[in-house]
Image (cartoon, rainbow, N blue to C red):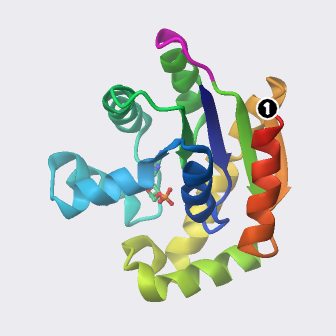
Amino acid sequence: MKNIILFGPPGSGKGTQSAKLAEAFELLHISTGDIFRNELKNETPLGLEAKKFIEKGMLVPDEIVIGMLSDYLDKMLEKKPAGFIFDGFPRTIAQAEALDTLMKEKGMNIDLVLALEVDEPELVRRIKGRAETSGRVDDMDEDTIRKRIEVYRNETEPVAGYYEKQGKLYRVTGRGGIEHIFEELSGAIRSL
Ligand code: AMP
């Protein structure tokens, strides 16, 4: 199995690249943001609880995210995938530790963490562009966008160091065309 994390700030292209990589390498794409948006669309208790945080640009509390991810992973394992690509998870050190424990329990591990690096003005520009079609409540106003980037810097960026210590981090500049970045990410996966 190949299990990969696509890491990076909001607007860095994680969703786009994860979907392309999942298809190319036959991996199952797990996006915690997409799971929450789906729960919200169906107005489930989990979706409605998550909405309170998402619309403010804050992280959903760890215990909610970890519990949800664990259940989802069990369901996805029934499909006997060639591996997973995690998009938007883990976003805190506590989530990274919980993921290590979960993977170990299931006889798996994380092989590679691909980190997309994009500067803040470009992130804001991209998310504002995306807002015109995404319909996402958290893409709509600049304050929420900047809050999400700040939360990323404070709570999520340290997760890169966590994987760097494990020798699993591979940094890629997230500027340039989608295909060019995809080739670079693909190369890193192929060299596993
Ligand atoms: P995303 O689609 O990955 O940008 O996620 C959208 C929003 O969902 C985030 O801004 C958070 O509010 C919430 N979310 C998604 N994944 C996580 C996570 N791993 N931990 C906490 N909150 C999350």
| Residue 137 relative to residue 21: left or right | left
Q: Quadrant of residue 66?
A: top left
Look at label 1 and name its amino acid: Leu
Camera sees residue 119: no
Residue holding disc 1? 192
Q: Secondary structure at mark 1?
A: loop
Residue situated in front as seen by the camera: 32 or 137: 32
The magenta segment is 104-109
| In the rendered image, the vertical position of residue 24 relative to residue 165, given as above or below | below
Pointer 1: residues within 10 angstroms few (<14), some, or many (20+)?
Answer: few
- Whether residue 105 is in magenta: the answer is yes
Q: Position of residue 128 (x, y in %)?
A: 56, 84
Q: Is the C-beta of the residue carrying label 1 under 8 Å from the nearest atom of ligand 1?
A: no
Assign the magenta stretch its main secondary structure. loop
Q: Is residue 136 magenta?
A: no
Give residue 68's position: percent from left, percent from top: 33, 35
Residue at (74%, 30%) from the top-left corner? 162
Where's residue 85, x and y in %? Answer: 56, 42
